[in-house]
Amino acid sequence: MKQVRRSVTLPPRIAKQVETIAKQRALSDNRVLVELIEQGIEAAQQKEKAFFHLAERFRAASDPEQVKQLGSELGRFVFGE
């Protein structure tokens, strides 16, 4: 697969964290950034799947108490706790 070169500007705090992780794991800063981006994408995809699963359960629920509970869960999912 062809590599694509990107240039990013990191805030100093993030750059320092990346350097620290790279040193701890004996990796390049670039490799750490790639792994963190991959993990972030995976986490976002999992969160999206979880949201749609919860929304489907909410739509399918008929018990008022369950509807209330699932609605609260959806609210926390969307707006945070």
Image (cartoon, rainbow, N blue to C red):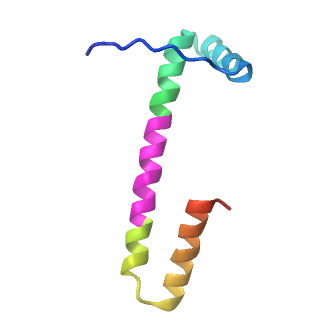
Does residue 3 appear to the left or right of 55 in the view shown?
left
Residue 77 in percent (x, y) is at: 56, 61
Task: Report the side of 10 relative to 27 (left or right).
Answer: right
Residue at position x 43%, y 76% in the image: 58
Q: Which residues are magenta?
A: 40-53
- Which residue is pictured at 49% across the width and 28% down the height? 37
Residue 52 lies in magenta, yes or no? yes
Q: Residue furthest right?
A: 13
Task: Please name whichever residue, 50 or 7, is drawn nearer the observer in this view of the structure.
Answer: 7
Figure disc tally: 0
Image quarter (top left, top right, bottom left or bottom right) of the C terminus: bottom right
Quadrant in which the N terminus is drawn: top left
Please report the residue visible at 56 percent of the width from the left and 61 percent of the height from the top.
78
Figure quadrant of residue 32: top right
Considering depth in this image, is 55 or 39 the residue closer to the camera? 55
Q: Residue at x 43, y 53 (%)?
A: 48
- Dominant SS in magenta: helix
Q: Is residue 65 above or below residue 41?
A: below
Locate residue 50: give its quadrant. Answer: bottom left
Residue 28 position, x and y percent, is 54, 9
Q: Is residue 55 magenta?
A: no
Image coords of residue 66 (percent x, y): 50, 83
